[in-house]
Image (tube, rainbow, N blue to C red):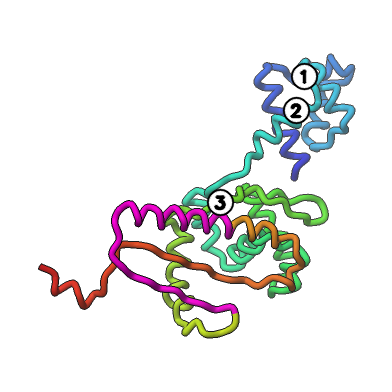
């Protein structure tokens, strides 16, 4: 996958410089037909890549830099991408797994997903630009540490239903369970302070998630964490308002 993407960048750079296959053939002392076959097969050695870069008066490192810039980490998906994820439960599961930094072996050994299915779903995630699928089914995440689902988007609405029907349906008295709910009257300034602290806590959550990703899968637990803040009062009080 990476090799194909790198060659795509090479082709784009050649077009930007208005260089044709005929120009490359002349510069490399090859036939134009062989050059076309070389690009069509997506099999260019480092020596060939470097030689073509020299024809464009650039270094091989410049090409790699262009490749990296084209693979910038994303902070959000599009609505269409999120819709595709929730259209297939197993695809969504694999997406959540890779976001939690599970590798290929973890996914197929802990879920009812075959090797073939997993490769197929990882390939779809690669096409969605959520991951880079590397040789030997290694996975490289392309989403940023601060990645968030679209506000009120397809996936947030999907999980909201799960939260309301499953996550909150608990007494929160078991091991590693806790629920905290407080209410009070606050000034606008104090509310803003609380909202800032929630953002800081979210960043700490993300950092701990990143650090724990180094641990084996069986040393980690899947948890949900919710701390909410909004203007609120009991429904039964509303009719009593002046």
Indicate the quadrant where residue 43 lies: top right
Q: Answer whether residue 182 is magenta in the image.
A: yes
Q: Is residue 78 magenta?
A: no
> Against 105, is 1 above or below?
above
Question: Which comes sooner in the sequence, label 2 or label 3?
Answer: 2
Q: Write down the region rendered in magenta.
A: 176-205
Is 211 or 149 nearer to us in this picture?
211
Q: Nearer the viewer, residue 241 or 141?
A: 241
Marks 1 & 2, CB-CB < 8 Å contact: yes
Residue at 56% from the left image edge and 51% from the top image edge: 147
Left or right position of 120 against 87:
right
- Secondary structure of the residue carrying tag 1 is loop
Quadrant containing the C terminus in the rendered view: bottom left
The image quadrant of residue 71 is top right
Residue 95 x/y as whole percent: 62, 60
Alpha carbon separation for disc pair 1 and 2: 8 Å
Q: Give SS at disc 2.
A: helix
Residue 73: percent from left, percent from top: 62, 43
Along the line of sight, the residue nearer the viewer: 68 or 172:
172
Q: Mark 1 or 2 closer to N-term?
A: 1
- In the depicted structure, whether residue 67 falls above or below residue 30: below
Q: Residues within 10 Å of mark 1 (few under 14, many from 20)?
A: few
**Residue occupying the point 62% across, 47% down:** 129
- Determine which residue is flagged by label 2: 63
Query: Against 40, is 203 above or below?
Result: below
Label pair 3/1, CB-CB below 8 angstroms: no
Residue at mark 3: 147
Residue at horizontal 41 percent and vertical 57 percent from the top: 194
């Amino acid at each position: 996958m990476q090799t194909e993407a790198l060659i795509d960048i090479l082709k784009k750079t050649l077009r930007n410089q208005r260089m044709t296959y005929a120009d490359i053939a002349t510069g490399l002392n090859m036939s134009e037909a062989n050059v076309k076959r070389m690009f069509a097969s997506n099999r260019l050695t480092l020596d060939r890549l470097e030689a073509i870069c020299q024809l464009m008066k650039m270094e091989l490192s410049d090409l790699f830099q262009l490749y990296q810039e084209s693979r910038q980490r994303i902070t959000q998906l599009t609505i269409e991408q999120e819709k595709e994820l929730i259209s297939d439960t197993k695809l969504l599961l694999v997406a959540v797994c890779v976001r939690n930094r599970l590798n290929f072996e973890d996914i197929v050994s802990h879920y009812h997903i075959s090797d073939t299915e997993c490769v197929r779903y990882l390939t779809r995630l690669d096409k969605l630009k959520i991951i880079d699928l590397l040789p030997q089914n290694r996975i490289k995440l392309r989403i940023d540490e601060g990645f968030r689902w679209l506000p009120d988007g397809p996936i947030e609405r999907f999980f909201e239903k799960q939260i309301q029907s499953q996550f909150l349906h608990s007494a929160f008295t078991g091991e590693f369970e806790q629920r905290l709910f407080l209410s009070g009257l606050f000034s606008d300034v104090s509310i803003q302070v609380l909202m800032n602290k929630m953002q800081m806590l979210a960043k700490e959550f993300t950092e701990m998630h990143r650090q724990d990703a180094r641990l084996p899968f069986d040393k980690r637990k899947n948890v949900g964490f919710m701390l909410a803040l909004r203007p609120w009062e009991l429904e039964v009080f509303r009719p009593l308002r002046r």
